[in-house]
Image (cartoon, helix red, strand yellow):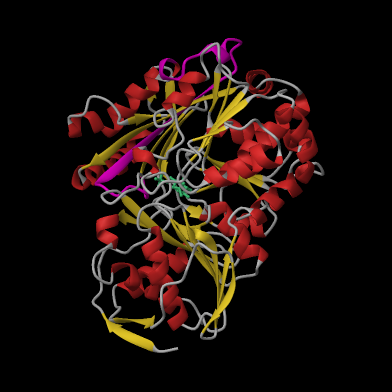
Amino acid sequence: MNIETISSAPYDDQKPGTSGLRKKVTVFQQPHYLANFVQSVFDSLEDCNGKSLVLGGDGRYYNRDAIQIIIKIAAANGFNELIIGQGGLLSTPAASHIIRKNKAYGGLILSASHNAGGPTEDFGIKYNISNGGPAPEKYTNDFFKRSLEITEYKLAEIDDVDLDTQGEFDLEGLKIRIIDPVTDYAELMASIFDFDLLKQALSSGYISMCFDAMHAITGPYATRILEEILGAPAGTVINGIPLEDFGGGHPDPNLVHAKELASLMFTADAPDFAAASDGDGDRNMVLGANIFVTPSDSLAIMAANAQHIPAYSKGISGVARSMPTSQAVDRVAAALNLPCFETPTGWKFFSNLLDADSITLCGEESFGSGSNHVREKDGLWAVLFWLNLIAKRRQSVEDIVHEHWQQFGRDIYSRHDYEAVDNEIANGIVNHLRELLPSLTGKSFGEYTVSYADEFCYEDPIDKSISDQQGIRIGFENGSRIIFRLSGTGTVGATLRIYLEKFSKEADAHTQEPQQALAELIELAEQFCEVKQRTGRIEPTVIT
Ligand code: G16
């Protein structure tokens, strides 16, 4: 195989964020931009020679072009096997599983997750290590460092690979396997959940449901599993064909971007259950007739009900949540005497705990939940968990949630996002908050007395690595919290996230509307961070 060495110059903006490098497609299309980053990753890894690499993405615009470039760079860097999803497609959780199942060295996953796709929208790339999980910070720091020094990359002189035909072939010593993206993942799901029970429930109509794939990667996965294997009626999966621009939509499963589905669930025609997933298939939104389940509650309910799911029926080792996720799961852990961990935002922080079997289930407020079956959050897994639970408990989603609140109390929760804020203003807000923190403890604001005010710093319990500046926390004596963070996944300006949480054990907790119940905290948050005053905005861009 002939290998060319291409001269290049570093870009200074290739620092991976919360989940890999995410930029506008036009940024990735700059000369050598993608190649520089991929070569920086390979240079930072110990030795790629003779190793196996998994490759796939969510099918968004530029996915196919990127895969052809990566194949040539991977071949030139000595990998001897590439496992690629047919059509260049692999959901993020499926890629994680395929890395683990094949004991691959790692994988490159192409996605900008829930961000919009298309020629003027977003693209992304991230490296996952051999445990199937996103590269930890010590890796991503090295990737960035290398990207600032890079002067050349290697490219194999080979033809483009036919991504659309499954099979295995040899390309001048490089083994290429084009695999069905769904089969392995579907088998994994069948090993976790009670597929016989689910078949009965879905094919008999005992559970009626709608799954919105948002024209993103879960379309083929959901159609195969829900309709073809479990027998849900054709049409259960809507927007099931992955499109390069997600049909012009925003593949973010929340109350704003999956509004149609959410509205349907509050009408007389609502099915029993509805769910949606995001661009790369790792997020989930879950709804029942008349009820939206917040991701934080979903995690808590999963933890409290894990014994109903075959794979977890013998018990779970512990649970974890990201810091801004509500404390609902903590209450379950306390009641069940389970270890409970609080990690920074970013799925990569769960991997060590999962590898050490310190936890079995974990989740985040950002519509993510998962377990030790892979090292990524998993949208369809969460959907199957809920279906299995409804079928087993023979109760509606609303009843399951209300019973949970009755037993544990309710963490009323909301997140307010201010997107595309000028970077200088956003940094000004964070600095202002940092200055404010030392003066807050002990101060009262109406019924809220501050019990702690700090910046979250995490020490990984397994490898003892430290991650600081992971969000500003203001906790109150009544258990309420306000958290402020700048997102690490946006591509335009800065996104300020304000997370609001109030615990209620009142009998009417289940009827409380979150924005009303949180009104005082929302005002306090503005008093602290001054986002409206500093940006001139009158309301958040997105409220979930
Ligand atoms: C990624 C990470 C998640 C994180 C989310 C939001 O999800 O994997 O752990 O919670 O981003 O992060 P931020 O608040 O920094 O924007 P995804 O689905 O985008 O890969």
Q: Position of residue 246 (x, y in %)?
A: 39, 42
| Rendered residue at 57%/31% (across/down) | 235
Q: Is residue 390 left or right of residue 429?
A: right
Q: Residue furthest bottom?
A: 2
Q: Is residue 376 above or below residue 114?
A: below
Q: Position of residue 38 (x, y in %)?
A: 39, 71
| Rendered residue at 29%/78% (across/down) | 149
Q: Position of residue 258 (x, y in %)?
A: 44, 30
Q: Quadrant of residue 28?
A: bottom left
Tell me, yes or no, if residue 206 can be seen here.
Answer: yes
Q: Quadrant of residue 296?
A: top right
Depth order, front residue of 539/111: 111
Q: Which image quarter is the N terminus in?
A: bottom left
Q: Quadrant of residue 98?
A: bottom right
Total numbered labels: 0
Q: Is residue 86 left or right of residue 542?
A: right
Question: Is 499 part of what is drawn in magenta?
Answer: yes
Q: Which residues are magenta?
A: 487-516
Depth order, front residue of 461/488: 488
| Rendered residue at 24%/46% (across/down) | 493
| Rendered residue at 36%/45% (across/down) | 245
